Amino acid sequence: MGQAGCKRLSQSLFDYKTEKYVIAKNKKVGLLYRLLQVSILTYLVVWVFLVKKGYQDIDTSLQSSVITKVKGVTFTNTSELGERLWDVADYVIPPQGENIFFIITNLIVTPNQRQETCAESESIPNAVCYEDSDCPPGEPIMAGNGVRTGRCLQSGNTQRGTCEIFAWCPVETKSRPEKPLLGKAEDFTIYIKNFIHFPKFNFSKTNVLDTKDRDFLKSCRFDPKNPYCPIFRLGSVVSWTGSNFQEIALQGGVIGIQIEWNCDLDKAPSECNPRYYFSRLDSRFPGNSVSSGYNFRFAKYYRDEAGVEFRTLMKAYGIRFDVMVNGRAGKFSIIPTIINVASGVALMGVGSFFCDLVLIYFIKKSNFYRNKKYEEARPGLVPSPAQVLALSGGCVCWHLLEQATGSLLCGDLLTAGCPGLRRAHPSWPLGGGGAGGA
């Protein structure tokens, strides 16, 4: 038995098995199958290959560098600063031109601050006192400007006062101006230079037109039809985000400038063009909410003739710009093409599986199609042609033999003059023709 089993196993290694197909003459299921095939084929061609370009290898590891410059001057005349001309060195922070920069549009100026003692601002809740014991010396005031000295300073005849502090005095007490200091800054220009590189395809490009005309960048302005002049008017950028310039200049805000590169490298390099998107990134609250806007403080330090240090404190309101770059590049490759074609072929198999479910479970004649699709084979029921001839005693019934071996109905042979079969195999069923022959 062991040798016979090994022999059968070794012989089966060289067998080839193929599927048996049952053709169902059902128009409804056939139409459903063709519709599924057309739908899958349309999805594969239109969506996968034409829209998503599934035949391309993709590189999303974009390497990018951004350089920014702001230009423009304006003139102001205020009681704190007097007559002053503002240029790019005064209102742009940081000055070296990075992908994140800030343009000052409004200021609260507290000049000539020196380190000495003075009364804390009345707007600080923890600075309120009624006697000296309310101001323990050496303790800083939370959200305040300095360190308590131990004295409570009352103003006038009122018992309520504020703690004396050691700080940069006088402390900041002014509120935000009702009009932006640099309200004419909307005519300033922003120059954004962007270099990109896709390492997988060794492809590089910039958003500035490659020209020998040195006056090109001095005269051009950005236009959606001309993306290779990245010089933007400040007021236009704000309006493209749906905001009002005077409003954002008064209390500040954050604007995002997104540069998107989607490059089809199967086409000419000139077809790879940048697209610009502008959006307001900070949350805008209704009315004069304390959460609205964007501001921070900085100071400029000086020394007087005696060598004593003093400073001018500035609370700056303005517009912060975040320049963000993203993109992807694609180029034909045989590997993703094969993968997507194979996926489409697999989806065709899903269509066949779905139609099989409909055919054998959901239509009226499902039992008939189920019996045709799934055959039950029992060993010993069907004789070989040699057995039929030997047991029949020489009677040759070729047409009945073919029927018996194909449909497991052997009664036709038995009732047609082949009694040897009945004696040898009494358990064989009689066919429909056998009853008539008897």
Image: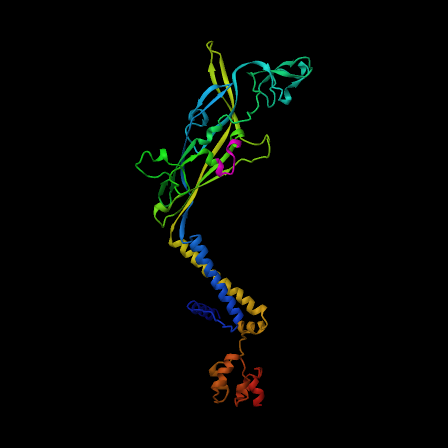
Q: Does the stretch in magenta take in 124? A: no
Above or below for 188 versus 303: below
Q: Residue furthest top?
A: 306
The colour scheme applied to this rendered structure is rainbow
Q: Residue 273 falls in which quadrant of the image?
A: top left
- Image quarter of the C terminus: bottom right
In percent of width and height, residue 424 lies at: 54, 85
Which region is colored magenta?
Answer: 238-247
Q: Residue furthest left?
A: 212
Where residue 264 appears, x then y in whole percent?
39, 48
Q: How many marks?
A: 0
> Does the segment drawn in magenta span residue 244?
yes
Q: Main secondary structure of the magenta part?
A: helix
**Which image quarter: residue 162?**
top right
Out of 287 and 423, give the one closest to the viewer: 287
Q: Is residue 340 above or below residue 179?
A: below
* Residue in the foreground of this view, choosing between 304 and 278: 278
Tell me which residue sits at (35%, 45%) in the image.
Answer: 270
Percent across and percent down for residue 369 are 55, 73
Q: Name the residue located 42 percent from the left edge and 33 percent from the top edge.
A: 190
Q: Is residue 361 above or below residue 307?
A: below
Residue 408 location (% of width, % of height): 53, 80
Q: Nearer the viewer, residue 36 or 295?
A: 295
Apparent side of residue 132 relative to residue 329 in the rendered image (left or right): right
The residue shown at (47%, 23%) is 76
